[in-house]
Amino acid sequence: MLALIAALYLARAFFVPLLIGVLGSYMLRPVVDWLKALHIPRSVAAALVLIVLVGSFSWIAYALRDQATTMIEQLPEAAQKLRKTLNDARDGSPTALQNMQTAANEIQGAATDAGLKPGARVVAAREPEPTAWLRDYALAQSALLIAVIAQTPIVLLLTYFLLASGQHFRRKLVQFVGPKHQNETVNILEEINVQIQRYLLVTFVSNTLIGVCTWLAFRALGMEQAGVWGFAAGVLHFIPYLGPVLIALASGVAAFLQFGSPLNALAVAGVSLLVAVAIGMVFMTWLQSHFAHMNAAVLFIALLFFGWMWGVWGLLLSAPLVTIAKVICDRVESLKPVGDLLGR
């Protein structure tokens, strides 16, 4: 088990695009099947679906480029205004965080002095940067994101081949396990297909609700371009946890620039997080557990584990992987206790 976890962690640049391609084939298979029912060849239908998907994302990115550029240009001004506001509110007195940091430095200095030999010189240690861990984490996740984006053509090709092959790959897999376990294998594959499609349906419904509720809430608060914020909230929620945080930060900065008040900025960011938590992290987790008969606590633990192992992409892939594991455990006699542990 430790060797498997180490392999998944070290080879994450390979496994993450592979799993994204497999998940994409599950998501797009019903559309390809519908086009095939219209007497369109499966290979042509798969190509058409992928072209429409890539074209839609490209069009959305092109349509929102002006708003994104404007927001980036306003970030330095927002940072200066926010810093000035915080300095004015502080009146020059040290904050609680600064007092805690000073106390920690004093304790570290006392411990260093106690461990020195008589006559030894004290060398001043360089004070660690408070946000170094955040910078290192952001750099690591950015490197993984760039690696996956660079492999986008490979992911698209893998998705195309899986969609174009249809049932061929499944039949080969069934033949590989032998006649004794063919029925079990067919049932497992069918159940995995149903559960993954249900998960994707739940994700789509949840993100749509988040986009609509964010748009209505921002419109009630008087935010400009509330529809764009709602659309961005629905799209970025595909990245669990990090997506809502990015929306909250960006909307808070925009509210601060628009209203000039930190309270209004906190209200907008708080409403954005409240909608994401209420719908995305509570309703979506409950709905997933209802569809897949999964334990909500197990899903949350899986989010923590895969998020630690693969970062942002692990958060995205954790629920489908746990669902697949439960389907297999429920169908294999020796693994049924594990399936009971994962179930509701």
Image (cartoon, helix red, strand yellow):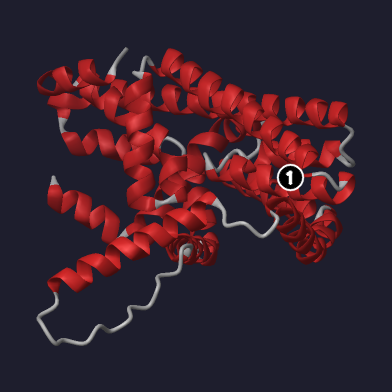
Q: Nearer the viewer, residue 155 or 86?
A: 86
Dot 1 surroundings within 10 Å: few (below 14), some, or many (20 or more)? many
Q: Is residue 342 left or right of residue 221?
A: left
Q: How many numbered circles does the render carry?
A: 1
Identify the residue at image location x=22%, y=56%: 7
Q: Is residue 293 above or below residue 71?
A: above
User: Which image quadrant is residue 339 in?
Assistant: top left
Q: Is residue 217 above or below residue 307?
A: above
Give residue 142's position: percent from left, percent from top.
Answer: 51, 63
User: If the image is split into quadrants, where does the N terminus sit?
Assistant: top left
Q: Is residue 122 left or right of residue 98?
A: left
Give residue 10's position: percent from left, percent from top.
Answer: 27, 61
Using the rendered image of the protein, determine whether residue 37 is visible from the camera's viewpoint.
no
Q: Is residue 41 above or below residue 119?
A: above
Give residue 40's position: percent from left, percent from top.
Answer: 65, 38
Residue type at the position of mark 1: Gly
Identify the residue at image location x=28%, y=69%: 109
Residue at the farthest front position = 119
Disc 1 marks which residue? 252
User: Which image quadrant is residue 276 in?
Assistant: top right
Q: Nearer the viewer, residue 37 or 219?
A: 219
Identify the residue at image location x=52%, y=40%: 241
Using the rendered image of the protein, determine whether residue 299 is visible from the camera's viewpoint.
yes
Give residue 143's position: percent from left, percent from top.
Answer: 47, 67
Identify the residue at image location x=16%, y=18%: 336
Q: Is residue 142 left or right of residue 14?
A: right
Q: Is residue 267 left or right of residue 152?
A: right
Q: Nearer the viewer, residue 27 or 173?
A: 27
User: If the image is split into quadrants, where does the C terminus sit?
Assistant: top left
Local secondary structure at mark 1: helix
